[in-house]
Amino acid sequence: MSIRPVRSRTTAKPTLEGAGVHLHRAFGFHEPTAFDPFLLLDDFRNDDPARFEKGFPWHPHRGIETITYVLEGEVEHGDSLGNSGVLGAGSVQWMTAGAGIMHQEMPRPNARGQMHGFQLWANLPSSLKMCAPRYQDIAGADIPEVIDDDGTRVRVITGAFWGQRGPVDGIAADPLYLDVSVPPLLRKSLPVDTHASAFAYVFAGAGDFEYASRPVGVRVEKELDGQELALRDWSGNRTLVRFDTGDEVTVQAGPEGVRFLLVAGRPIREPVAWHGPIVMNTREELHRAMQDLRNGTFIAPPG
């Protein structure tokens, strides 16, 4: 086994999107191939309805897949093809935009005013850019959770992990998408595809991926003294950790444990031409998409 070293570590930045939704962007737009096949990760956790209730009114998508994972609250969605529904707490929607749809997403708070979740964009290869749009709406109860003997909990959204397979399938990037919770002060290793791009996004507690990824024979620790804890360079809430190559990711959980998304997918390695929610391979294809929007031919008729 080869432990993946940390390639970079950054903090998600406050961003305003949609009709005035305050969120934090972990990555997106500036380096379109840095996380290939993934394009963007937004963290839309918020406890003030006034900062998200205007939502994301009608907007186009083409050439990508969007993955929405809701932790708290609800997201009501609809599109120009007549699809609609509500994503509840713990649920996932994987939308393949393909050739194009017009789409809207309107967040609704829970009783405590919370709207928590994430949206990840995955690129489509050129052969699938103009495929027929489709949805996969998965209820929280249908997402398997694996609990290891040491108390580590993993929700398997897509991909195969520890004998379970996530319910989302048929995705171009063939990704692994996990929601991982590691108990306090436990060091844990998690297998990933050696050839996949991989990152972790911490959203509760703290973990040390940098220290744990150094293959120096450090024991599996359940108890650390105060001096060693103080020396650790913890990755806390809204920290994005990008990994180099290897076939496992290792994390040392902090005193309160750590919870993070672990995402991996094989790179597409194709040119990226990007304008807002439309991602193609060439500028000419982008111009064609804009022309389709202007002349009303962006959405292909059903069938």
Image (tube, rainbow, N blue to C red):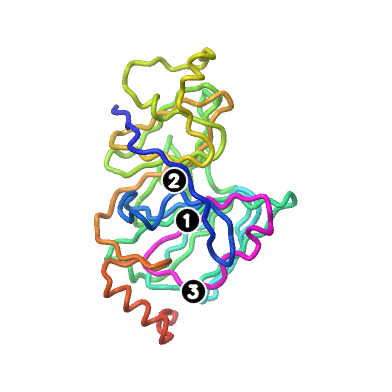
Could you say which disc has been placed on residue 102 in the image? 3
Q: How far is mark 3 from mark 2, CA to CA?
A: 26 Å
Q: Position of residue 100 (x, y in %)?
A: 41, 73
* Nearer-N-terminus badge (3/2): 3
The answer to if 7 sits in the magenta stretch is no
Q: Amino acid at mark 3?
A: Met
Figure quadrant of the N terminus? top left
Q: How far is mark 3 from mark 1, CA to CA?
A: 16 Å
Q: Is residue 228 above or below residue 138?
A: above
* Nearer-N-terminus badge (3/1): 1
Q: Amino acid at mark 2?
A: Tyr
Could you say which disc has been placed on residue 177 in the image? 2
Q: Residue furthest bottom?
A: 295
* Nearer-N-terminus badge (2/1): 1
Q: Amino acid at mark 1?
A: Ile
- Label 2 with label 1: CB-CB less than 8 Å: yes
Q: Is residue 257 above or below residue 58?
A: above
**Tag 2: Cα neighbours inside 10 Å, few (<14), some, or many (≥20)?**
many
- Label 3 with label 2: CB-CB less than 8 Å: no
**Label 3 vs label 2, nearer the camera:** 3
Q: Work out whether residue 81 can be spotted.
A: yes
**Between residues 64 and 236, which one lies in front from this camera angle?**
236
Q: Which residue is mark 1?
A: 67
Q: Position of residue 150 (x, y in %)?
A: 52, 23
Q: Residue at x 44, y 45 (%)?
A: 177
Q: Is residue 164 above or below residue 225?
A: below
Q: Which residues are magenta?
A: 43-68
Q: Secondary structure at mark 2?
A: strand
Q: Residue at x 53, y 50 (%)?
A: 43
